[in-house]
Image (spheres, helix red, strand yellow):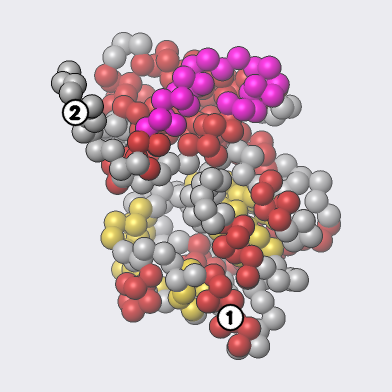
Amino acid sequence: MYAYILSQAGCSVTAVCRSNYTFVKEHGFTIHSSKYGQDIKLRPSVVSSIVETAAQQNNEDGDAGWDYIVICTKALPSSTPSTCDLIAPAVGPKTTIVLIQNGISIEDDYSARFPSTPLLSCVVYMPVTQTSPGIIEHIEPLESLEIGTYPATASAEHKASAQRFRELVKKGGGNAEVYDDIQERRWLKLVVNAVWNPICALSRSPDASVLAASEGAVDVVWEVMLEVVATAQAYGYTAVDEEKARWQIARAKGRLERGFVGKEPSMLVDVWEGRRMEVEAIVGNTVRLAKGKGVKVPRLETVYVCVKALDESIAKGYRGSLAAEPNEKAR
């Protein structure tokens, strides 16, 4: 979607694709969007399967390098090779790295690896699904990008790069705002993500369905949200408060009252598809930050232990079968 928005702004966009590379290389993307229109055909300027190949081609063409490297992958800090390793061949003297990813404390690896490169941390609200290779469904007309430098005290030059990126997104028809401290915006989204993502994944249920399943569900979800709020406030983000949490849980209640099964967070979809989840970036880092300030988060910690185990079972390819010693009966 951001390849489309940036191309609409007149940018030359190189798309690095993975599982959908063969299809996109031949056919491009087809976007069905409730905001931008149906059957939009997008052909990036260049489609590559790996960053290094794109960088080599870029050098051969005599280009001065990329202005922005926009990372829209899942935040999986333990992946090998790391995303920092993957993008390294493309980082040049005029490059700004843009992280359009979920989670908290996801920026440190990039700032350590590329200390002089401007780094933008972004919070995105855009419910989009790739239903098959190269086919993109954007059902709800929601699209919003919140941008900030990392760290918040970055130089004026880095702040200017954030403003330029905002203007490109807006020129392409997107919504974008720049914030002095993007971490507050990350914590606000985390009130939703660190709670609903793992709970829905563990229960194999959309959010409204979780609330409908038992009398105590609302109270449990609420208490986990309050633990995230307490952690954010311990780090000085007082705007992340009970009112914001109450509004978020009311949204799920509203879906339940309207008879909907609810919203399907990304971790739930990942479980259905047998993919690794953003456990550490969204839940694990939140738990560790809470411990760093002495905030008690027993409910969230329990959720983390359980969803971490689920993620590891997905990585090992478990599909509900029970392994037993040859001389033991499975009970």
Q: Which is closer to the viewer, label 1 or label 2?
A: 2
Q: Residue furthest front?
A: 327
Rendered residue at 34%/57% (across/down): 130
> Is residue 301 found inside the magenta-colored segment of the image?
yes
Q: State which quarter of the image contains the C terminus.
A: top left
- Give the image location of residue 80, x and y in percent: 52, 53
Along the line of sight, which residue is nearer the eye, 20 or 249?
20
Q: Is residue 57 left or right of residue 126?
A: right
Rendered residue at 42%/13% (across/down): 219
The relative height of residue 25 versus residue 283 in the rendered view (above or below) is: below
Q: Residues within 10 Å of mark 1 (few under 14, many from 20)?
A: few
User: Does residue 209 appear in the picture of this structure?
Assistant: yes
Give me the C-alpha separation between circle 1 and circle 2. 54 Å
| Count of numbered marks | 2
Magenta stretch: dominant secondary structure? helix
Rendered residue at 72%/42% (across/down): 181
According to the picture, the residue beneath numbered tag 2 turns out to be: 326
Along the line of sight, which residue is nearer the eye, 327 or 33?
327
Q: State which quarter of the image contains the N terminus.
A: bottom left
Secondary structure found at label 1: helix
Q: Is residue 194 left or right of residue 105?
A: left
- Give the image location of residue 312, x and y in percent: 40, 36
Amino acid type, residue under disc 1 in the picture: Gln
Along the line of sight, which residue is nearer the eye, 123 or 178?
123
- Give the image location of residue 171, x and y in percent: 59, 67
The relative height of residue 220 versus residue 97 in the rendered view (above or below) is: above
According to the picture, the residue beneath numbered tag 1 turns out to be: 56
- Give the image location of residue 249, x and y in percent: 44, 24
Q: Residues within 10 Å of mark 2 (few under 14, many from 20)?
A: few
The relative height of residue 182 versus residue 155 in the rendered view (above or below) is: above
Give the residues drawn in magenta, as a range. 287-310
